[in-house]
Image (cartoon, rainbow, N blue to C red):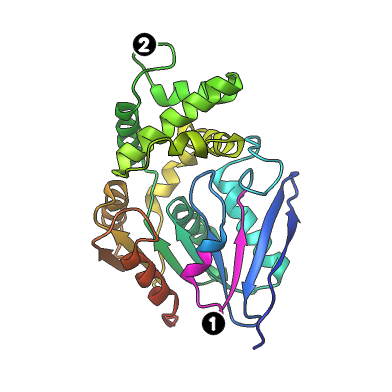
Amino acid sequence: MSSTALTRGYYPTCDGHQLYWERHGTAGAEPVFFLHGGPGGRSHRHHLEFFDLRRFDVIFFDQRGCGRSMPQNDLCGNTTGLSVEDIDALRQHFGFAKISLLGVSWGSWLAIQYQQRYREALLKTTLVSVFVPFPANVSAYEQSLNDGLSTAADGSAGNRVRDIYQILSEGCPLQQRHAAIQWLEALLQHTGQSIRPGFLEDFVDEEAIRAIRLELHYHLHRYYFTPADEGLTLDDNTLLIQGIRDVFGMSSVRWLRQRMSIRCRLLHAGHNAFDPATLKAVRQALMRDIEH
């Protein structure tokens, strides 16, 4: 196997999206698709920390509407099901008979959904900081965020998450910026993270606003969870890595355990996949052998 230089490009979907992709690592090695978080996130070079590039042929891509994919923040035709179809279209584009998946946070749900449709195309699946959008989990998550939002957009009680989405969709740039900062403050409060004063004012730009709007698009559609998802299964080559301080990740793990036997490694960590303990566990998990 020879090491390859970074290559990148765009993959055109049949419905008008251009998916940005990068390929790293070693040609001929085990192909691994990295599924980033969000919805609305993007792939970054620091995600390479998960991989031993001598051992893997790694495919990054920005999900439709995300990051460098185009059109940016396009909400038309942006669903969980179509994102799953994008994964398989890219698998075929690169000529892989079978692939492994590493899904983090929202990406873990895309990996689970891919497994339901294309199990025969999978080598192994690694799920990190798991998110399953079953109705009770989404409702509890929304309530937590609503509690963290100081006031509704119109000053009244109500669904403040929906208010933030409306401002991000229809407000003027100043209103959008303020709403995005409100949202991120609530999210940081929910996760127990602290940041330096003024960070969000420096961080929030047009890209951040687009990313939050896309995330809320999925949230208000309940992540396209369907009754059929109640009956999903996971194969023997699936491994979960989950921090016990991640409240909604742990509720996702419990939901899965009620339905099937799962292999899960629990860590004293939160939702952050770059926590040193989680990062080490991910690197180890990716090196595991495939069960036959």
Residue 203 relative to residue 189: left or right: right
Name the residue carrying label 1: 55
| Amino acid type, callout 2 | Ser
Is residue 214 on the magenta stretch? no
Q: Residues within 10 Å of mark 1 (few under 14, many from 20)?
A: some
In this rendered view, identify the residue nearer to me: 17 or 198.
198
Up/down of 270 relative to 236, above or below: above
Q: Residue furthest front?
A: 197
- Identified at 48% across, 25% down, the residue is 179
Q: Nearer the viewer, residue 156 or 117?
A: 156
**Where 202 sits versus 290, above or below?**
above
Q: Position of residue 274 (x, y in %)?
A: 39, 61
The residue shown at (45%, 20%) is 163
Which residue matches tag 2?
156
Report the residue at 52% width, 36% height from top. 204
Tell me the quarter of the image containing the N terminus: bottom right
Under circle 2, the secondary element is loop
Q: Which residues are magenta?
A: 47-63
Query: How far apart, in angstroms, are the residues tagged by discs 2 and 1?
Result: 55 Å
Residue drawn at the location 34% of the way across and 66% of the way down = 276
Examine the rendering and report whether any part of residue 136 can be seen. no
Q: Nearer the viewer, residue 275 or 76?
A: 275
Q: Position of residue 8 (x, y in %)?
A: 71, 63
Element at label 1:
loop
